[in-house]
Amino acid sequence: MFKKLKNRFFVIMAITLVAFIALGAGLGNLTLTQGGELSTQSESKKIRSLTLKGSRGQITDITGIPLAYDQSSYDIQFLRDPTRNSTTDKAYYTSVLSEAIALIEQGGGTTIDTFNIVRNEDGTFGYDFGITNEQDIEKRRVNWCKNMFVSDEASPDAIYRDLRIRYRIPEEYTYEQARKLLSIWQEVQLSSYRSYVPVTISEDVNMDTVALIEGKSDQLDGIQVGESSIRIYPKDEVAAHIVGYLGKMTDEETIKDYEDKGYSQNDLIGAAGIESTMEQYLTGNSREKQGTRVVEVNSRGKVINERSYTAPTDGYNVRLTLDLQLQQVVEQALEDNVNLVHDEQVQQYNEAKPEDYDDNEDVQNTLKSREGNSTLEKMNLAKSGAAVVLDVNTGRVLSMASYPSYDANLFTGGISTEEMQALNDDPAKPLFNNAISSKGIPGSIFKMVTGMAGLAEGAINLDTRITDEGAYPLTDDERKEEQITGHIPACWAYPDGPWHNHADQSVADGLKNSCNFFFYRTADLLAQTTGSTDTLSQWGEKFGLTSSTGIELTGEVVGQVGNQSVLYDPTKPISTINSEGVEVTAQKTSLPLLIRNTLMNYLRGCGEKLSVEYTDEQLKKTAERLIEEAGKDLTNYEIGEQIRDILYEELQISQTYSKTVGFDNDINGYLSELRWNKRQTIITGIGSGTTAVTPVAVARYIAAVANGGSVYETHIVDSIVDNDGNVIEQREPVVFNRIDASDSYFNAIQEGMTQMVSEQANSTTSIFNGWKYENQIAGKTGTGTVSNIDLENNAWFVAYAPREDPEIAVVIYIPNGIGGSHAEPAAKEIIEYYLDGKTEETGTVLPSENTLVP
């Protein structure tokens, strides 16, 4: 028996020894072979890489005066312990956040308001992601629900109440109080994958708030003060449309695009102006400019040690071509001019006879669809304007103003809903840049294009003499005279003015007198000589009036010079539906859409005569088929049969009845407005009809007239400068087009503009009379007719100075500003400031024309 026990003992010992050997080998492998690897893995779980971003670059004027810069500021942040996730922990943090909010508000600050569920006025709940595109909203909603760990099938009301319970928000808290807390919890949850990065709960707080928070830091677990920067626009409203402002990314495509460049979703980007177009230079958020801070964090996500630090690169500075002092003068001169015109309009109305406006049937018909309690309230009076000062030899913008302006600082840190609504509701549209985004009928400032085109194409020459004959004959051998009926164009001076003085006029005389008849005839001869009604439009393109100017700003629109494709282009649909679900024109003008709607109303009346009620869809389809038929051959007036066929096919109106009662003739009359004819050819010659241009494009056109034919791209950016003051990109002048025409032609056009100002200066009522620089400028007024109410006409004044060796082109545009001469005061102030500056630089007085320097 003892022997058996002994054997068992040795067996057990052997097994134990083998086990110890196996354990020892495993331990050795664990500590020696895999120890380094496991140690590294353990360390990597504690190491975090923090992305550092530089400050945004400055925007300055040409002399280096800042127009936008980043300023250091303090934020209040929240960093929760990611291991504390229990219900008790959430209740604890909610109480901490409630106290922090109270302290922030006590110090005069506000907390973030980003919670994406909002309570409507009727008490119901809905989503608000700050976007309008339905597809983007749905995508954002689904992602939001996923990230917030709520059901995307639950109602917003149910989710709101569920989140209040989840984060232990007391029942007695109001919606407004709960919203503040939920905004913070939402940001914590959405950034939970970066739990070691604090969430900003209040931006740009004052030192009082910092003191309140730090004074109770031992009671505010997770609340801390952080440093950041805020965008400052030191000149407030000055150059606001040019400098622009920052905003949050909203649509999914933009967010993805910028995230691919290294931005985070919460980074601000340029939303308008130079802030937007120069984003790639100004930003310190892009990947190539980012720095890195490698740190160790403890189990609660708190940084305990810094391993390495690579500083970020700040954004580059953008130097503009603007001169701030000139810009301030231009903005003030424009504002004063607009207000002056508005006051004069009110005075003219008050002094007018009743039959001029209140009892005028035509005027009242124009106003009947407008809002307002009186004739004056319904009128479109001067309330906005634009001014551009351009270097005629480079295309550099020395000043650009749009009135009214806005304070760009409103957008710093996020504009309130009320402030944004006030800006959008303002009828003067302060956010709208009139200098590049508005198009207006130019009137007589277009006559230099007509004159140059007539000379260069051989329709007239320098010896041509044209006498004003009153009403311009519209007879056209190729078309029926009755197809060109209605108002007969005549010169502005006929019949009441001294039109008989417009006799034997050269092209310079025509410009001096601004004789409409002269340029009617020139436009007519031009079409006959070239065999095309598109020639004036082509010359508008040569002068840069119908293309982008190249300016580095957002929102530039492109003008047009009247021709058939501008009037109605059969290759394009009549309308389209915009992103807001509203039907808008798809053509260059709204005329085809207006004709379609007019036809629909007419056809509805036809149905009433037949005791038939047509649906809107029937009427729309019929009207569009009629316009499409006319568009097949816009030179063919004989489409009565086709019209009758369409009426029968769509509305079951017999061909015989349509012809008997004249439906086809009436409809053909409406359709004729879409066909280019002789009247439209000649009124295009005076900048009327469907021609509409932008102030910035007009500026480069006038610059080309002044410099002898070089049409430059316009630029408002001078250079890009790095943080050491090195110029890394210099914008050079770029010629858009060189007009190949005789110098003698330019001399004749320039002489006309010179005589125009001289003629005005001889009048005792002119603002140029007795002015010290009356002999140093050349210019042209323009009155763009926009309705049958004279007070609503557009006012333009264009000029260049000095006459000899021109340097600047000046354009003033006041929509609904009565007439061209009413835009002169601003130009006078601007040119006087500029020429005074030249006098100060040289220490001499500019000589008058044909005199010697004393």
Image (spheres, rainbow, N blue to C red):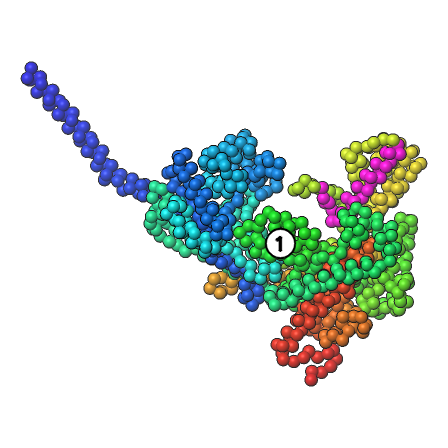
Q: Which span is picked out in magenta? A: 583-610
Q: Along the horizontal axis of the image, is 273 left or right of 771?
A: left
Q: Residue 643, percent across and down?
A: 86, 38
Q: Residue furthest top?
A: 1
Mark 1 lies on residue:
554
As for residue 587 lying within the magenta part, the answer is yes
In the rendered view, would you say 774 is above or below 715?
below
As for residue 213 lying within the magenta part, the answer is no
Q: In terms of secondary structure, where does tag 1 sit?
A: loop
In the rendered view, would you say 82 is above or below 153?
below
Amino acid identity at mark 1? Thr
- At a point 85% along the width and 31% down the height, the residue shown is 612
How crowded pointer 1 is (Cα within 10 Å; few <14, some 14-19, many 20+) is rated as some
Q: Residue 363, percent across and down?
A: 84, 52
Q: Residue 807, percent across and down?
A: 67, 70
Q: Is residue 723 visible?
A: yes
- At a point 44% along the width and 40% down the height, the residue shown is 94
In the rendered view, would you say 515 is above or below 151?
below
Q: Residue furthest bottom?
A: 854
Which image quarter holds the C terminus? Answer: bottom right
Q: Nearer the viewer, residue 338 or 289?
A: 338
> Image quadrant of residue 279?
bottom right
Which image quarter holds the N terminus? Answer: top left
Q: Residue 565, percent across and down?
A: 76, 49
Q: Residue furthest right?
A: 660
Q: Along the horizontal axis of the image, is 158 left or right of 122?
A: left
- At a point 6% along the width and 17% down the height, the residue shown is 2
Q: Along the horizontal axis of the image, is 434 left or right of 641?
A: left
Q: Is residue 517 visible?
A: no
> Image quadrant of residue 746?
bottom right
- At a point 87% along the width and 36% down the height, the residue shown is 606
Q: Along the horizontal axis of the image, is 702 left or right of 495?
A: left
